[in-house]
Image (cartoon, grey):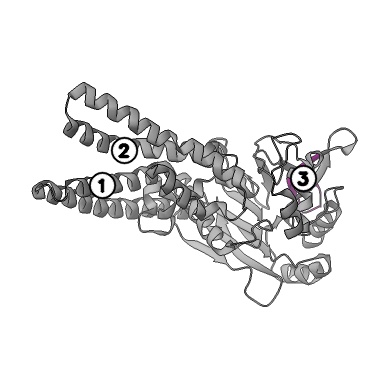
Amino acid sequence: MGAVLFRLLFSLGTVYFTLEPILWVSSLLIFLGLPIAIFILKRGLARAFHSLFIAQYSLLFSLPFLWTFFDHLQARYSLAPIYIATAGNAFGSSPFVGLAGLGGLLFLTFFAALINALITGIVVNSGSGKNKINLAITAFIFILLFSGWQISNSELHKNSIAYNNLKNSIKIAVVSTNEKFNYGQLERLKKELSSQPVDFIIFPEDIFNDPPFGNLSTPIFQNLAKELNTNIVATYDTLQGDKNKLKYNSAILFDNRGNVVGVHNKNRLTFVGEYWPFGNWRPPLTDWLKKRNPEIKNYAIFDPKNSDYRGERNLLTAAFQKNSALFASPICLEVHYPADLKEYKKSGAKFIVNPTSNRWVSIGLNHFLYLANNLKKIETVWLNLPIISSGVRDFAGIILPDNQTRLIDYQAGGKNYRVFIGEIKY
């Protein structure tokens, strides 16, 4: 019951973004494996050692491992990824973020669980006259925290040296907008981009909020790439396949002549927004949600025919003046799958481009962005790869492997868009 109540409250940190109880309940059911495992282990240890004392302390020793396992099992196999709600994600904005270099979010979660298990040991011993044991545990906690801080700094410094020693670099422009940006403001944006020539421009996902019935954005970005004489990544719904009947959420790479030279079709579809696994069944709150937000009618939950098709994980290749570079372009929540990013790096990706659209977040956007950026910081430190962020209602900029965060707020500046200009090495 304690685990249920904790997870129920802790999940409020993410579930309220969507007000989706199915996602909430599914993730909770997975995490219930933790108290069940503890119950079984406690019974087994008590019978094996015939001692409640040994069983309790053996259980405390196993807690960091059990917690880490079920925390990440829940994050990975919920209907939508919730790595931003794992215990280790809180370290993304802490002096311990460099520990991600030792094992990513998994290691940070174990570190957090270990510290909490030790504190639990002190609580268990309180009032039992075991002051010396509590003193030893307290000293061990401080040693762990100090050592973690030092190792974190060392890992960040190592990443900084490796990144600064890279020989190739390009100048990039990253665009983020609010939901009010439209076609009529594109000319103004184009003039701003043309005033500072760059090698690569990244646009957010669904910048024009196109309806899903045609490749309306393709000629716009083709002309833009030719006029600005640069590579462009733009992300929007496309129709592909036989007679253009298959709808994908696609990151399109245009070269400086306007040619389409690469396409990444989203592989990790978003529950409710892009696919609905329950056939014709609808949750009772469907009608209420329709009245509350009429735009939600385009979601797959209300029309299974509108579901996206799943693409393949692949890399894109951008050609610059002197060389070319492989990169990955995970779309929106695809960046919330750390294992996928690791596979991209193994395949040769030199950096990550993450176009997003947060039109679906109606409550608590700032907190969501804080948690999402924490995860990106952890991933970039872990993989030693920079991540470029661009989005509708999102920050624009770069997160570097040494945890340097160069992001600008889409809301500032008195316009419906912001442009980040910077350099990225690879």
Q: Is residue 101 magenta?
A: no
Q: Is residue 248 magenta?
A: yes
- State the image coordinates of residue 187 (x, y, percent, origin top left): 81, 69
Circle 3 residue? 302
Q: Residue at x 55, y 59 (%)?
A: 369
Sequence-earlier tag: 3 or 1: 1
Res 109 seen here? yes
Circle 2 residue? 63
Q: Report, in whole angstroms, how far the alpha carbon at label 3 lies from the one at label 1.
A: 46 Å
Q: Nearer the viewer, residue 71 or 107?
A: 71
Which quadrant holds residue 33? top left
- State the image coordinates of residue 83 (x, y, percent, origin top left): 50, 46
Q: Amino acid at mark 1?
A: Thr
Q: Secondary structure at mark 1?
A: helix
Which segment did they paint magenta? 247-260
Sequence-earlier tag: 1 or 2: 2
Circle 1 residue? 120
Q: Residue at x 22, y 31 (%)?
A: 55
- Tell me: residue 164, above or below residue 192: above
The answer to the question of whether label 1 and label 2 lie on touching residues, with beta carbons closer than 8 A, is yes
Q: Report, in whole angstroms, how far the alpha carbon at label 1 lies from the one at label 2.
A: 10 Å
Q: Amino acid at mark 3?
A: Phe
- State the image coordinates of residue 192 (x, y, percent, origin top left): 73, 71
